[in-house]
Image: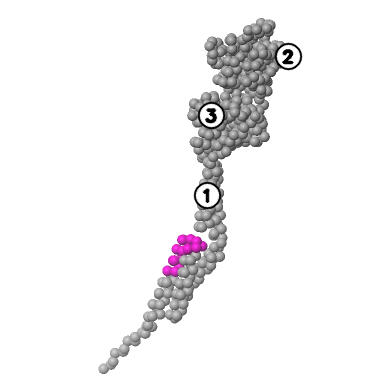
Amino acid sequence: MFIILAAVLAGIGALLSGYYFTMRPVPLRIAVGPPSSDDVRVVQALAQAFSRDNTGVRLKLVVADGALGSANALATGKADLAVIRGDLQVPKEAQAVAVLRKNVAVLWVPPRAKGDRRKGAKITKIAQIADKRIGIIGRTQANVNLLKVVLQQYGIDASKLDIVQFSTTELADAIKDHKVDVFMAAGPINSKITADAIAESSRGGTPAFLAIDAAEAIAQNHPMYESAEIPAGAFGGSPPRPDEEVKTISFAHHIVARKSLPESTVSSFTKQLFAVRQSLMNDFPLAAKIETPDTDKDAAIPAHPGAAAFVDGEEKTFLDRYSDYIWWSLMAVSALGSVGAWLASYLRKDERNTNSTLRERLLDMIAAARKSDTMDELDALQAEADDILRDTLTCFENGAIEEGTLTAFNIALEQFHNAVADRKALLLTPPFTPVRPQRPQVV
C-alpha cells in the first residue's frame, strides 16, 4: 500500500510540476532596429505592457542596426522573434506572426525654385526620370533596391541614373543646391519623416507626385509587394499633398518567429500582442497599424502555426495540448501501482506460504483433538492454535493474505474449537457402568 501511495503521489507531483513549467512566463528575445526608431519604441512599449499585465510571455529586446540586422539575428539564433522588411531576404526558418506596419513608396518632384536653370520638361511620369538625379530618403540599401524594382518594370536602366542617399538633416542642402530632380521615401502613410521631407522640399511651390501605374504588375512579379494607394492629403499641407489619390506599391514590416518555437508559445504571444495593441494606440499611433498575418498557404511569408491558430480561432486549450501527456501519465501511474502491488505480493510470498502451512496444520489439529485422551493434550493443541491465530492476524495486517483467506481460516479455527469443546466434554463425563437387574427371590 505504501508503494502504491508513493507511486500515486509521484504521479501527481509530476503532473503539478508539468503544469507549473508549462504555465510559467516564457522569455522571448525579439530583434528590432535601428536604434531610436519608431519600431524600437513600439516593441519597448509592448515589452513593458507584457510585463505589467503578467502575461505568459516576456520580451527581451535585441537592438539591431536595422531590418537586415534583425533578420540575421533570427537566422543565427540570437533572437526568437524579429522585425524584418518583407522585401528583404527572409530567413528560411522565419514564419510570420503579425504585420507590424505597411509601408508605401512615395516619389515626388520638388517645385523648381527661382533661379533654377535646369532644362527639360517638368517630370510628371516615372518614364521621364531616365538620366535624372534621384534622391532617396534614408541610407538603407533596401530603399535603393525598391527603386530598382520600379525602374525595371518601366524599362529604365538604373545604372544610367544618378542615385544618392541622404538623411532628413541633409535634405535642405540638397534642395538649396538643386542637386535632386526626384525624391523617393519609403515608410508608413502617416510617417512623420516622409511628411517632413515633402514639406521641406516643397517650400515655395507644390510638389508633383509620381504614380506607379504598373503597381499590379510589380506585385504580380514580386509577391513581397502589393498594389496600394496614397490618399489625397495624406501628407497634409494647403493645398493638400497629394491633391488626389496616387497609385503606388507597398510592402510590410513583419514580426516573424523561428519555426522551431512551440505553437502554444507563439499563439500566446500573438494573443497578447493584439490584446495590448488598443492600450498602446494613444501613446504610439503606429501600434494601430499592427495587423494579423496572411494565413494563406501561398503567402509570401508563411504564417507560424501558432499565429494561424489564433487568427483562425483554433487555439488549443491546456487540455487539448496536453491531454495525451496526462492520459499517458495516468496510465503510467496505474502501471506503477500494478507493479508495486505485484512486487509487494512477491516479497510476501514466503509469509503467505508459511500461513498456508499453518492453516493446514490447524486442520490436522482438528482430527488430533478428536482423538486426544487427556486434557493436557487438548490444552497444548489450544495453545498452538492461539499462536497460529496470532501469526495469521499479523499476515493479514501486513497484506500477505486477503480477507477471503482470513474468512477460510476463521471457519477452520471455529471447527477446531468445536472439536476441542466436544472432546473435553466427553473426557469429563464419567464412564457409564451398566446396572444388572436383580433376580426376584423365591419365597
Task: Name the residue tied to disc 1.
Answer: 13
Magenta includes 399? yes
Q: Position of residue 333 (x, y in %)?
A: 54, 50
- Image quadrant of residue 213? top right
> Is 344 rendered above or below residue 239?
below
Q: Residue at x 53, y 11 (%)?
A: 238
Please name the residue shown 65% across and 9% down the image: 123
Which residue is denoted by mark 2 in the rendering?
A: 160
According to the picture, the residue beneath numbered tag 3 turns out to be: 311
- The residue nearer to you, when weighing 93 against 205, is 205
| Marks 2 and 3, how far apart at CA | 46 Å
- Examine the rendered structure and indicate whether residue 87 appears above or below residue 316: above
Indicate yes or no whether the magenta region holds residue 406: yes
Image spot of residue 132 (x, y percent): 69, 12
Mark closer to the chain start, 2 or 3: 2
Q: Is residue 158 above or below residue 270?
A: above
Q: Residues within 10 Å of mark 1 (few under 14, many from 20)?
A: few
Q: Which residues are magenta?
A: 397-414
